[in-house]
Image (cartoon, helix red, strand yellow):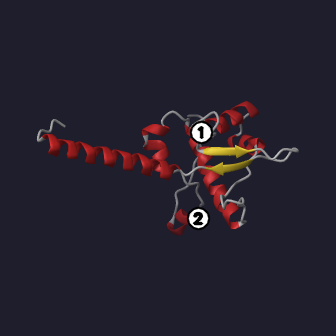
Amino acid sequence: MKDSFKFDYFYGSQAEQFSFFRLPKILIRDEQFKKISSDAKILYGIMLDRMSLSRENKWMDQNNRVYIIFTLKEVMKEFECCQRKAGSLMAELDSKSGIGLIERKRQGLGRPDLIYLKNFIAVQEDISQKEEKQEQGEVLHCRVARKCHL
């Protein structure tokens, strides 16, 4: 690689000097999120970071749901991409055209959309509970039938 740089090592407390975006492992490892792109997952991580700021600033609706404002121009800036790519990333996450990790609410009059991040953990817990109930049902069925071919 011709354009490589000579970076220095981290020494002592320097390793703790950076802030990071959180990217939940479930977005990488869980089968239900395999179909969305890595860039869309990173965008969701950036939005999660932005959400903590919104909570501190008390950006909540009448139902106590935290929202963020993250325009297409901001996505373009973060990813150094064109409007089409930024729109595509948002669409991957959107509840109308994508996986449903975000919901955009139009404000109209040229004002930016409010973006609500969805709680993917609740979905995972529901799936786990359904699987647990299914397993319990199979065990119960085995006890009743006195045969078990699992």
The mark tally for this picture is: 2
The percent coordinates of residue 74 (x first, y second) are 75, 46
The C terminus: image quadrant: top left
Residue placed under numbered mark 2 in the picture: 17
Asked whether 29 or 112 is in front, the reply is 112
Marking on residue 24 = none
Q: Position of residue 75 (x, y in %)?
A: 71, 43
The residues tagged by marks 1 and 2 sit, at their Cα atoms, a distance apart of: 25 Å
Residue at which label 1 appears: 39
Q: Nearest the camera: 112 or 142?
A: 142
Residue at the image point whose x is 59% and y is 39% from the top: 39
Q: Residue furthest bottom?
A: 13
Corner quadrant of residue 80: top right
Residue farthest to the top? 84
Residue type at the position of mark 2: Gln
On the image, the x and y values in percent for residue 4 come to 58, 40
For marks 1 and 2, the one nearer the N-term is 2
The percent coordinates of residue 61 (x first, y second) are 72, 58
12 with respect to 40 (left or right): left
What residue type is disc 1 on? Asp
- The residue shown at (56%, 43%) is 41
- Quadrant of the snapshot with the N terminus: top right
Residue that sits furthest to the right in the current view? 109
Q: Which of the 4 image quarters holds residue 65?
A: bottom right
